[in-house]
Image: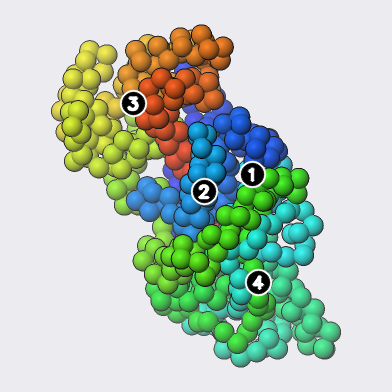
Amino acid sequence: MRRSVFVIVLVFCLGSVALAAPTSLERVSRHWTGDLSEMITQGRPVRVLVSYNQTNFFLSKGVMRGLEVDLMNAYERYLSRSNPGKKIRIVFLAVPFDQLIPALLDGRGDVVAAGLTVTKERKKSVAFSLPYRKNIKEIVVGGHRSRVLSSLDDLAGKRVHVMAGSSYVEHLRSVSSSLKARGLAPVDVIEADPNLVTEDLLEMVARGLIGYAVAENQLAEVWKKNMRGLRLFNDVVIHSGGELAWAVRPGNTGFKESLDDFSRTVRQGTLKGNMFYKRYFVNEDHVLNFRNPLADGRLQPMAKLFQKYAEQYGFDWLKIAALAFQESGFNQDLKSNRGAVGVMQIKPSTASDPNVNIKNIEKLENNIHAGVKYLHFLCERYFKDVDPEHRVDFALAAYNAGPARVRGLRTKTAEKGFDPNLWFGNVEWAAYDIIGHETPDYVAHVQIYYAAYKAMSDVLTKRNKAM
């Protein structure tokens, strides 16, 4: 309908032989169920499971935004203050809403941050933090073709669509049972395709594609401002007094205690909490153009070029996009004080080197071509002895700091008794010690944005089919 997502299978640079290698997304989502203290000691990223929507987690001009993004970024700063000398990172992993808790329990993430309502059923399987939002009201919404509803009794015999795996399902079925017990027709509760979120259902209702849906009243109010035809039935409340909290595995007591303490500083009613809340539930700018974030704004005219040259040199185009965002924020007009230019922030001298040999990098296509070809050259010339799964990590570091410096770091890493063929948790830490945080942060940020882009691309591809 309104979205299109490009799907490319990731192939890291592997020399003359093209072999599929595990993606960064697969690496960070591998099974692991340790607690917070163990994670910090090992230098693991905090893997935050999110559901892509236009309220809690989305992209705007390449930047991750949303209420949960802001809250979890604040949590990253909180953890850094609580653990001086330790490098704390947050990685966002998008999955369908009904897969949030299964992914958590399976060890593919460490905390669920997705506007999750605390329910008795969910408390049987996960441990919730102290709530950061309270008094949540769930109402029925309709469109311009929907018959007006004035009470819960008017739901008798009506078909209502709800987001799969949401608290709305449980609460609406409770209402339906109550109606049936009083001799009225039950509600026809339809769980939507697992890849659709509440915002999708609101759009479908407004367009007359479905008759009714359920949404949090404050979310529905924001969307009503910019979606003609959406009607809110504020008297048809299927549940009130709801609480939103973050979820962790039951055995991760350290995580829960940390999130409890953090929640007290950002819950609704605090200065920070109110600031974050107003950003997404009072201001409605973020809902004006709810389209595929991987084909919008500054990224849109570059996407095909990223695809073209990523495929030519054996990369995932989303990783190239993440690199470009880290370098320039997709700004072709950017010039650094070191002489680097354009989206890929490559120097003319580097681009004109015989190993790259791309001229006129002030032109967007040439700039992207030069950057991707240079990254491929780094892989081929300097890091062929590294396992393909980790080779691009080193190439990214060299893109930032230069290949000679990265080779020196590998030597120092081996001298310290660590693995010189692994960047994260090995050469990375030597880099922090020897040259400071710039290059380790650079590589981490590229990989973090790549993981987010990749996860969202997978989710949105499936959502396209469902819409």
Disc 4/disc 1 C-alpha distance (Å): 23 Å
Is residue 293 found left or right of 148 in the rendered image?
left
Disc 2/disc 1 C-alpha distance (Å): 17 Å
Disc 4/disc 3 C-alpha distance (Å): 47 Å
Judge the density around disc 2: few (<14), some (14-19), many (≥20) Cα neighbours within 10 Å: some
The quarter holding residue 357 reads top left
Q: Earlier in the sequence, mark 3 or mark 2?
A: 2
* Location of mark 2 (residue): 78
Where does the image place residue 296, in percent across and percent down from the top left?
35, 52
Local SS, label 3: helix
Residue 104 seen in the figure:
no
* Location of mark 1 (residue): 110
* Location of mark 3 (residue): 400
* Location of mark 4 (residue): 242
**Vertical relation: 298 (above or below) 13:** below
Q: Residue at x 38, y 53 (%)?
A: 60
Disc 4/disc 2 C-alpha distance (Å): 26 Å
Judge the density around disc 4: few (<14), some (14-19), many (≥20) Cα neighbours within 10 Å: some
Residue extending furthest bottom? 150
Count all numbered tags in the image, as a single digit: 4
User: In front here: 193 or 353?
Assistant: 353
Where does the image place residue 68, in percent across and percent down from the top left?
52, 56
Where does the image place residue 204, in percent across and percent down from the top left?
51, 69
Give the residue type that dot 4 points to. Gly
**Vertical relation: 460 (above or below) 431:** below
Judge the density around disc 1: few (<14), some (14-19), many (≥20) Cα neighbours within 10 Å: many
Local SS, label 1: loop
Q: Earlier in the sequence, mark 4 or mark 1?
A: 1
